[in-house]
Amino acid sequence: MRANKNLFWILAVFCLLLAGVYIFWHVLDQGTVEWVGALGIGLAGVLSAFLAFYLGRVFSAQGGDLPEDRLDSDIDDGDPEMGFYSPWSWWPVILAGSASLMLLGFAVGTWITFIGVALVLVAIVGWTYEYYRGYFAR
């Protein structure tokens, strides 16, 4: 995270300097300031400064280096437990298909939405209770 903070500060300074060069160059060429490009580049520098400031605050608040910031850490050091997901489950695919059918109903015809909502409810219940029935019941 420390490296990210430093990269964003470098990017902020670069964008702000580039905005100055852009304004100077356009004034030399056209005689006026081109505000859209100058503000776009300048605001990109301000956004980079905001991100660098935020990352710096988060780094100082966390109380130490993250595992990905240390050179002696392993990949497993920064790998938290994310939960349990079934590798063989087809319910997420069914849920995605029924949700897309429901959203298609908003665009094409309202009657398709009702079919999609019913299929979404079936998919959510099926995904929730897949370990309570069948071969993998507990």
Image (spheres, rainbow, N blue to C red):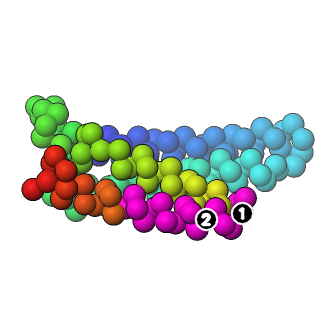
Dot 2 crowding, Cα within 10 Å, few <14, some 14–19, many 20+: many
- Rendered-image quadrant of the C terminus: bottom left
Q: Tell me what residue is drawn at x 87 percent, y 49 percent.
A: 32
14 or 114, which is in the foreground? 114
Kind of residue sitting beneath label 2: Thr
108 with respect to 117 (left or right): right
Q: Is residue 8 left or right of residue 47?
A: left
Q: Where does residue 113 sit, x and y in percent of width and height?
A: 61, 65
Total of numbered circles in the picture? 2
Q: Is residue 88 left or right of residue 49?
A: left
Q: What amino acid is labelled 1 in the image?
A: Gly
Foreground: 28 or 135? Answer: 135
| Image location of residue 121, percent across then percent down | 42, 65
Q: Characterize the local packing of mark 1: few (<14), some (14-19) or many (20 or more) Cα atoms within 10 angstroms.
A: few
Q: Main secondary structure of the magenta part?
A: helix
Residue 117 drawn in magenta: yes
Q: Is residue 53 visible?
A: no
Q: Position of residue 137 (x, y in %)?
A: 14, 53
Q: Is residue 54 magenta?
A: no
Element carrying mark 1 = loop
Q: Is residue 54 above or below residue 4?
A: below
Q: Which residues are magenta?
A: 106-124
Q: Which residue is mark 2?
A: 113
The quarter holding residue 128 reads bottom left
Q: Residue at x 19, y 50 (%)?
A: 134
Q: Say if 101 sits above or below 10 in the image.
A: below
The residue under label 1 is: 109
Is 119 placed left or right of 4 in the picture?
right
Contact, mark 1 vs mark 2 (Cβ under 8 Å): yes
- Foreground of the two, 5 or 129: 129
